[in-house]
Image: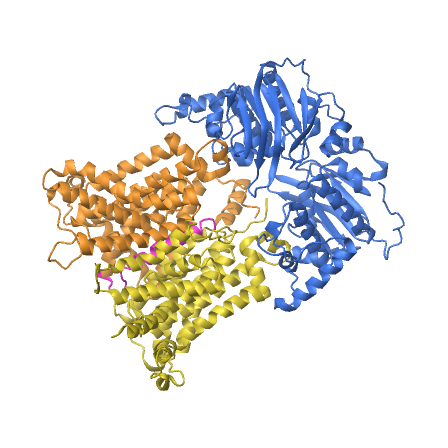
C-alpha cells in the first residue's frame, strides 16, 4: 500500500522492472522445457542460433519482427488514448483485403513501387474501416471497446473466409486464396540491406515492409509526443475529466485514435500478403494481432520499446520454429506459452516486484 | 443548544465511549495524524472540526479499521482494542456513515442493510428478521424508509438514512458521521440533526466530523479541533464560540482581508439569464438563475457546498450542457458551446478540482501549462507541438508565479498543492482573458500561496476583467468580492454588498432569510 | 428426411453445442458479477479439456477426468485472481495472457507426453461420459411429436448435459438466495460497501473466480471426454468468447444466459445443417453468416439497440481503498 506512492527513478521503472518481469517469464518457460524433459539452456542456445545464427534465420526473424512492429504500434496508439484495442488481429485481416485488392488491380500495369503507396493506403484504409464501428460504438454509445473489438475479430474472420471461399478464390482451384500477385504487386526482398552486413538472405521473406514499419514507428513517436492530436490523446488516456475541461472532444479523439490504430494494424498485412506469400490466404495474420498486445506492453507503448520488443518476439517466433525441428519434443506452440507468460508478467503482473524494488531502493539510498 | 449531559449523567459505566491515546499515522511523506489524544463521553454528540486535509477523515478511518495506526491505542468503553478491519469495528459497536455513501445502488434498502449482517448462509430467514428490525428502528428513532425501494431511486437524504440504519441494524452504540451535510439540502440537514439528537437521547454516542462551524454550534455537546494532523483543543460547545473555534482551526487569526481599492465596474461582460442546469440523474441543480458580472468587479457566489454552485460554474465553462437559459460573454450567446470555443472567446476557468480537471498529474509541468490552450498557434503550427516554445513560456510563468521547484520538466504530481494551483492560476490568468471564473481557488493550498493567489485575482479585477468567484469559504468570498450572491438549493436567493455581515450571509446560505 | 425429423435433429445438436457455452457463460457470470472481467474463459475451458482427457486416459475414469479438468481450470482462475485481485493488474491483459498459456501449454505438453501432435490418445469406455437413455425413451418413440422429441432431444444426452441445465437454477439460487450471492453481487457493484460492511473484498472475489474455474472445468470435460473422445489442439475454437458474448447478451442474468446459449448453440447447429444446402430462391446461404451472428447480435445489443446492457459497475477495476 504505502509503497505505491514512492517514486522510483526511470531506469528502474522503465529498465530494470520490465527486464526482471521478462526474466521471470523466461525462467518459467525454462521450467516448462525442463518439465518435458529437455535441457532449457540447450533449448535457449538452439533458439538463439535458429533466429540469429545465419543470414536467412535473421531474415525470418526480421520478417516476423516487421509484423509485430505494426501490431504493437496499433495497440500502443489506442492505449495512449485510454483504449484497449484487442481487435488488431481482425483489423490486420481486413487490411490484407485492402492490400490484396490494390495488388490485384495494379500488378499487371505498374511496377511495385507504384503499387506500394496505394497498397499501404488500401491496407490502412481497410484496417481503419474495421476499427471504425467499434470506435463509433465506444464513442457514441458507450459500448465497451474490449468486447466489441473481440466480437469484430470473429466477425472479420467469418467475412474473410466467406470472401476467400466464395468471391476471391481462383475459379477451379480448391485452396481459398487469391491468385498469386505478379511482381508489380509484390514487395521486394531486402537482400541488399542484408548484404551490407555481409549476410545472405536466402529464402527468407524479409522485405520492404520492414522499412515501412520503421517509418511508422517514427511517425507514431511524432504523433504521440510531438503533435497536438497526440497531446489530446494522451490527455484523454490519462484523465478523461481533464480532457473535458480542456475542450478535447471525446468522440472525435476516440474515433481518430482507433482509426490510426486500425490503420497500423491493417498495414501489417503488407508484410505477409505482399512481402511473402504474394497472395491473400485464410488466417494469414496468425495471431500477430495478439502478439501486438504483448509487444506494446513490453515496450511500454513507446515506439522504440515496441521495435525492441517486436525484435524479441521475432527471435522467439523464428527461433521457436527452428527449435521445434531440432528438438521434436518441443512444438512450435512453446512460443505461444512464452508469449502468454510475457503478457502475464510484463502486463498483468507488471507491478508485482515494485514493493520489493522500493524496499531495496530505499535501503540502497540510505546506505 | 447545550444538551451536554442533560439528565444523562447516570450511565452504566463512566468510561468514555471512545478514547484515543497517541494515535499516529503517516502516508509516505504525509503525516496525517500526529500523536492524537481524544476522549468521547457516552451519550453525547461530539464534533470534530478542522479544515480540509486536517486529518479528520484519516482519524475516523483508523477508528473504523480502514487504516491501521502506526502507533497509539484505541479504547472502547475502557477496553483497549485492536481494530484490524471494519468487521472488528462493527463488533466493537462502531458504525460509520461515510461521506460518499457505501451503498450498492441497484440493491434495495433491505439488501443494503442486510449486507454483511445476513444472519446465516441463506437469505430467507434473515429477510423477515431484517424487516421486523427495520420496523422497530423506524418507531424507535423515527427513521422511516421503504425497505423495498431501490437505492438509486431514492433522494440523497433518504440514502443517508439507509446508511444510519445500516449502522443501527448492526447494533452500533457509537455512530461516526463524516461530513454528513455536504450533500444534503438544509431541510434534510435539519432532519438529520433531529435524528442525531434522538439517537443521543436514547444513549448512543455520535461523532460528527465537519468543517462547518455552524453545525458544531447547533448540535454538539463537545467539540475537538484538528489542525494539520494534530488535535489542538477540545471544548464544551456551550463554553466556546465560533470565533474561538475558527481561530483554533486556522491556527492564527488570519486576516483574509485583501488590500484592494474601490471597484470600478464597467460594461457587462458575463451575463447569465434564466439558466437551469440538471445533473446526470435529471435533478435540477441550478434553477432559473440570472445575474451579471461587469468588467472590473469580482462577484462572489456564496453557498453551502452542493447548492448548485459547482454545476453553475461548469455550465458557464461549457463542461455541462444547460437544460435551458442563456449565457452571454461580452454579448455573445455561448450556452452549449464547448470549452475550446469559450477559451477563444476570452473565458478562463480555474476549476474547483485541480486534480481531476485542471491538471493531468502525470504530465510534465510545461505540458499542463498549456492544457486547454494547446491548439493555440504559439505552441506550434500545422498540428505539431513546439516543445521549445512551450517550455520557454513555462519557465517565464514559473519565475513570475514563483512556482517551486522551478523545473518545467518535472512531473506535475510531484509539486505541492499550492504550487499545482499556481500552475493552473498562471495558465488561466496569463492568457489575459475577458472573463475569469474561479472555483475554490485556495482549497488545499498553503497560506503563502493563498495570499499570492488572492492578490492575483484582485489584480485581474483592477485590470478590468470580470471575475466570478465560487468558494465554500465564506471568509474568502467576503474578503475578495465586490458583490456577493448567495446560492441556496439551486437558486440565487439574494445579493449583498461586500460589507454584509457574516451572520446575514450565513442565514441566507442556510435558506432562512433573504 | 421430412421437416419434423430435421427439426428434431437440429434441436438435438443445438443442445449438444449449447452445453459448453452454458457452463462457460455461467462461469463468467460468477466472475463478472463479482467485478472481475474474465476474457480467460476460453483458456480455462481449453486447459480443462486437456486435463480431463489426460486424466481420463490415464485412469480410465470419466469422473476423475472431470476432477482433473476442474482442478486445472481452478489453478488458471487462481493465477487470474493473483494477477488481477492481489496485484491489481489489468484484468483483460491477465485474461489474454492465460488464453495464450492454455493454447500453448496444452499442445506442448500433449506432444511431449503423447507424441501425437498435440492430441491426446483416444479415451473409451468408462473414460468417457456416454449418452444416458432416459426411461421409456424407446417406448415413447412412436408417440407423435412428443415421442421423437423426448427420445432424441431430451433423452440420449450424457450426464454433463443434464448437470449444465441443473447449474442454471442452482446459479440463480446461489446468486439471489444465499449470503454468498448477495455479497458477490454487491462486490461487483460497489466493493467499498462490501469492505465497510466488514467483508473481505479479496477473499470474496477469489471465491468468485474459483467458482468460475469450477464451472469451466465442466465445460472442458464436456468438450474432450463427453462430446469427443480425446483432446484435440485448440478444440475450444472460440467457444469461450461466444460464451462471453452470450453472457453479455443475457445481461449478466442466469436464466437469460441459458436462453442466450441455446440461441447461439442453435445458430451453430443450423449453420452445420445448412452447409452445402441451397435455399430455394436464394441459393446457398454462406455458413459464415451464422458463425458471425452471435457476435453481431451481441454488438447490436451492446450498442443499446435492444434494451440497455448494464454491466456490473465495478467491473474491470481492482479495488483500492481510497487515498
- The C terminus of chain C: image quadrant: top right
- The answer to which of B252 and B313 lies nearer the viewer is B313
Q: Position of residue B243 (x, y in %)?
A: 79, 30
Q: Is residue C18 visible?
A: yes
Position of residue A162 in the picture relative to residue C208 (left or right): left
**Chain letter corresponding to the colour blue:** B
Give the image quarter of residue A249.
top left
Front residue of C174 and B56: C174
Q: Position of residue A246 (x, y in %)?
A: 48, 31
Q: Is residue C84 above or below residue B376?
A: below
Q: Give the magenta part as a residue range.
A: A325-352
Q: In front: A134, or B291? A: B291
Q: Which chain is yellow?
A: C
Magenta stretch, main secondary structure, is helix
Left or right: where does residue C201 sit relative to residue B76? left
**Number of marks:** 0
Examine the rendering and report whether any part of residue B404 can be seen. Answer: no
Left/right of residue A29 with respect to residue B364 in the rendered view: left
Determine the residue positioned at 43% across, 48% down: A143
Q: Which color was chain A given?
A: orange
Q: Position of residue A237 (x, y in %)?
A: 44, 39
Q: Give percent across and percent down for residue B229.
A: 69, 39
Q: Is residue B333 above or below residue B61?
A: above
- The residue drawn where x is 56% and y is 30% is B325
Residue B303 covered by magenta stretch: no
Picture quadrant of residue B471: top right
What colour scheme does the image use?
by chain
Q: Is residue B339 above or below residue B186?
A: above
Q: Quadrant of the N terminus of chain C?
A: bottom left
For image coordinates 75% across by 57% down, the residue present is B137
Amino acid at each position: 500500500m504505502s509503497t505505491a506512492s514512492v517514486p522510483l527513478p526511470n531506469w528502474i521503472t522503465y529498465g530494470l522492472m520490465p527486464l526482471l518481469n521478462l526474466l521471470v517469464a523466461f525462467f518459467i518457460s525454462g521450467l516448462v522445457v525442463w518439465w518435458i524433459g529437455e535441457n532449457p539452456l540447450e533449448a535457449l542456445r538452439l533458439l538463439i542460433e535458429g533466429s540469429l545464427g545465419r543470414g536467412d534465420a535473421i531474415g525470418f526473424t526480421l520478417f516476423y519482427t516487421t509484423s509485430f512492429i505494426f501490431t504493437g504500434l496499433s495497440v500502443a496508439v489506442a492505449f495512449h488514448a485510454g483504449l484497449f484495442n484487442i481487435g488488431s488481429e481482425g483489423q490486420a485481416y481486413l487490411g490484407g483485403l485492402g492490400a490484396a485488392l490494390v495488388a490485384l488491380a495494379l500488378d499487371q500495369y505498374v511496377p511495385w513501387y507504384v503499387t506500394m503507396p496505394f497498397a499501404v493506403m488500401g491496407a490502412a484504409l481497410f484496417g481503419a474501416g474495421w476499427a471504425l464501428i467499434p470506435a463509433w460504438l465506444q464513442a457514441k454509445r458507450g459500448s465497451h471497446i474490449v468486447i466489441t473489438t473481440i466480437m469484430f475479430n470473429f466477425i472479420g474472420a467469418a467475412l474473410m473466409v466467406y470472401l476467400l471461399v466464395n468471391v476471391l478464390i481462383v475459379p477451379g482451384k480448391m485452396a481459398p486464396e487469391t491468385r498469386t500477385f505478379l511482381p508489380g504487386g509484390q514487395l521486394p526482398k531486402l537482400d541488399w540491406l542484408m548484404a551490407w552486413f555481409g549476410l545472405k538472405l536466402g529464402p527468407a521473406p524479409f522485405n520492404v515492409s520492414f522499412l515501412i514499419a520503421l517509418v511508422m514507428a517514427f511517425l507514431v513517436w511524432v504523433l504521440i509526443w510531438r503533435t497536438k492530436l497526440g497531446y489530446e490523446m494522451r490527455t484523454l488516456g490519462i484523465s478523461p475529466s481533464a480532457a473535458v475541461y480542456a475542450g478535447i472532444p471525446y468522440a472525435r479523439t476516440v474515433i481518430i485514435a482507433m482509426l490510426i490504430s486500425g490503420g497500423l494494424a491493417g498495414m501489417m498485412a503488407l508484410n505477409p500478403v505482399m512481402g511473402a506469400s504474394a497472395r491473400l490466404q485464410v488466417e494469414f495474420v496468425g495471431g500477430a494481432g495478439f502478439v501486438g498486445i504483448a509487444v506494446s506492453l513490453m515496450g511500454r507503448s513507446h515506439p522504440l520499446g515496441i521495435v525492441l520488443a517486436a525484435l524479441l518476439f521475432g527471435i522467439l517466433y523464428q527461433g521457436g520454429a527452428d527449435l521445434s525441428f531440432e528438438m521434436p519434443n518441443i512444438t512450435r506452440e512453446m512460443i505461444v506459452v512464452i508469449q502468454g507468460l510475457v503478457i502475464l508478467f510484463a502486463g498483468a503482473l507488471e507491478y508485482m516486484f515494485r514493493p520489493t524494488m522500493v524496499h531495496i531502493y530505499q535501503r540502497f539510498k540510505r546506505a | 443548544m447545550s444538551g451536554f449531559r442533560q439528565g444523562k449523567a447516570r450511565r452504566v459505566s463512566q468510561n468514555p465511549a471512545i478514547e484515543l491515546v497517541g494515535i499516529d499515522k503517516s502516508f509516505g511523506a504525509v503525516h496525517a495524524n500526529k500523536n492524537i489524544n481524544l476522549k468521547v463521553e457516552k451519550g453525547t454528540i461530539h464534533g470534530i472540526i478542522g479544515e480540509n486535509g486536517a486529518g479528520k477523515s484519516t482519524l475516523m478511518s483508523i477508528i473504523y479499521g480502514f487504516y491501521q495506526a502506526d502507533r497509539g491505542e484505541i479504547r472502547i468503553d475502557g477496553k483497549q482494542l485492536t481494530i484490524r478491519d471494519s468487521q472488528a469495528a462493527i463488533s466493537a459497536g462502531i458504525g460509520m456513515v461515510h461521506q460518499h455513501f457505501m451503498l450498492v445502488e441497484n440493491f434495495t434498502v433491505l439488501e443494503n442493510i442486510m449486507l454483511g449482517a445476513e444472519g446465516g448462509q441463506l437469505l430467507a430467514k434473515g429477510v423477515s428478521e431484517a424487516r421486523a428490525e427495520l420496523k422497530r428502528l423506524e418507531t424507535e428513532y423515527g427513521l422511516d424508509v421503504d425497505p423495498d425501494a431501490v437505492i438509486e431511486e431514492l433522494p440523497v437524504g433518504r440514502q443517508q438514512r439507509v446508511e444510519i440504519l445500516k449502522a443501527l441494524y448492526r447494533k452500533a452504540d457509537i455512530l461516526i458521521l463524516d461530513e454528513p451535510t455536504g450533500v444534503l439540502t438544509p431541510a434534510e440537514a435539519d432532519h438529520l440533526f433531529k435524528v442525531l439528537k434522538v439517537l443521543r437521547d436514547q444513549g448512543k454516542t455520535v461523532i460528527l466530523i465537519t468543517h462547518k462551524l455552524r453545525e458544531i454550534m447547533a448540535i454538539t455537546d463537545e467539540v475537538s479541533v484538528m489542525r494539520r494532523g494534530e488535535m489542538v483543543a477540545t471544548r464544551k460547545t456551550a463554553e466556546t464560540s465560533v470565533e474561538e473555534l475558527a481561530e483554533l482551526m486556522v491556527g492564527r487569526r488570519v486576516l483574509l482581508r485583501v488590500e484592494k481599492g474601490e471597484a470600478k465596474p464597467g460594461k457587462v461582460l458575463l451575463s447569465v439569464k434564466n439558466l437551469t442546469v440538471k445533473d446526470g440523474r435529471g435533478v435540477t441543480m441550478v434553477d432559473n438563475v440570472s445575474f451579471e458580472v461587469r468588467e472590473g468587479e469580482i462577484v462572489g457566489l456564496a453557498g453551502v457546498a452542493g447548492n448548485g454552485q459547482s454545476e453553475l460554474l461548469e455550465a458557464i465553462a461549457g463542461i455541462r450542457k444547460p437544460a435551458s437559459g442563456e449565457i452571454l460573454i461580452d454579448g455573445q450567446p455561448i450556452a452549449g458551446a464547448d470549452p475550446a470555443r469559450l477559451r477563444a472567446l476570452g473565458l478562463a476557468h480555474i476549476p474547483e478540482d485541480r486534480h481531476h480537471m485542471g491538471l493531468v498529474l502525470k504530465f510534465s509541468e510545461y505540458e499542463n501549462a498549456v492544457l486547454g490552450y494547446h491548439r493555440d498557434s504559439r505552441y506550434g503550427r500545422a498540428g505539431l507541438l513546439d516543445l521549445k516554445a512551450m517550455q520557454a513560456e513555462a519557465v517565464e510563468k514559473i519565475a513570475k508565479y514563483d512556482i517551486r521547484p522551478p523545473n518545467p520538466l518535472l512531473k506535475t504530481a510531484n509539486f505541492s498543492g499550492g504550487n499545482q494551483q499556481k500552475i493552473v492560476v498562471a495558465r488561466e490568468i496569463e492568457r489575459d482573458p475577458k472573463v475569469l471564473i474561479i472555483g475554490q481557488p485556495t482549497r488545499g493550498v498553503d497560506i503563502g500561496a493563498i495570499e499570492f493567489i488572492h492578490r492575483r485575482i484582485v489584480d485581474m479585477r483592477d485590470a478590468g476583467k470580470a471575475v466570478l468567484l465560487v468558494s465554500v469559504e465564506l471568509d474568502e468570498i467576503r474578503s475578495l468580492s465586490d458583490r456577493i450572491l448567495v446560492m441556496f438549493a439551486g437558486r440565487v436567493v439574494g445579493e449583498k454588498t461586500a460589507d454584509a455581515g457574516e451572520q446575514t450571509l450565513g442565514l441566507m446560505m442556510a435558506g432562512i432569510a433573504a | 428426411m421430412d421437416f419434423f425429423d430435421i427439426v428434431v435433429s437440429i434441436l438435438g445438436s443445438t443442445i449438444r453445442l449449447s452445453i459448453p457455452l452454458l457452463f462457460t457463460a455461467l462461469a463468467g457470470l460468477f466472475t463478472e458479477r463479482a467485478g472481475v472481467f474474465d476474457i480467460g474463459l476460453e483458456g480455462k475451458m481449453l486447459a480443462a479439456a486437456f486435463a480431463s482427457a489426460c486424466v481420463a486416459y490415464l485412469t480410465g475414469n470419466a469422473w476423475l477426468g472431470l476432477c482433473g479438468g476442474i482442478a486445472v481450470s481452478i489453478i488458471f482462475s487462481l493465477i487470474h485472481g493473483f494477477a488481477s485481485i492481489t496485484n491489481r493488474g489489468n484484468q483483460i491483459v491477465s485474461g489474454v495472457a492465460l488464453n495464450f498459456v492454455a493454447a500453448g501449454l496444452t499442445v506442448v505438453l500433449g506432444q511431449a507426453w503423447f507424441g501425437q501432435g498435440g492430441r491426446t490418445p483416444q479415451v473409451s469406455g468408462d473414460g468417457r461420459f456416454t449418452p444416458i437413455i432416459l426411461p421409456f425413451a424407446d417406448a415413447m418413440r412412436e408417440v407423435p411429436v412428443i415421442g421423437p422429441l423426448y427420445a432424441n432431444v431430451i433423452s440420449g444426452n450424457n450426464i454433463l448435459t443434464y448437470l449444465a441445465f441443473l447449474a442454471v437454477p442452482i446459479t440463480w439460487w446461489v446468486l439471489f438466495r444465499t449470503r454468498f450471492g448477495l455479497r458477490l453481487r454487491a462486490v461487483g457493484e460497489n466493493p467499498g460497501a462490501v469492505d465497510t460492511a466488514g467483508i473481505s473484498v479479496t477473499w470474496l472475489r477469489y471465491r468468485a473466480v474459483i467458482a468460475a474455474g469450477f464451472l469451466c472445468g465442466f465445460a472442458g470435460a464436456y468438450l474432450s471426454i463427453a462430446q469427443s473422445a480425446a483432446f484435440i489442439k485448440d478444440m475450444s475454437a472460440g467457444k469461450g468468447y461466444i460464451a462471453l458474448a452470450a453472457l453479455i447478451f443475457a445481461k449478466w442474468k442466469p436464466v437469460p444466459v441459458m436462453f442466450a446459449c441455446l440461441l447461439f448453440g442453435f445458430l451453430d447447429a443450423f449453420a452445420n445443417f445448412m452447409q452445402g444446402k441451397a435455399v430455394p430462391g436464394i441459393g446457398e446461404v454462406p455458413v459464415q453468416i451464422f458463425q458471425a451472428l452471435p457476435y453481431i447480435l451481441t454488438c447490436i445489443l451492446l450498442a443499446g439497440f435492444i434494451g440497455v446492457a448494464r454491466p456490473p459497475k465495478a467491473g474491470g477495476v481492482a479495488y483500492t481503498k481510497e487515498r
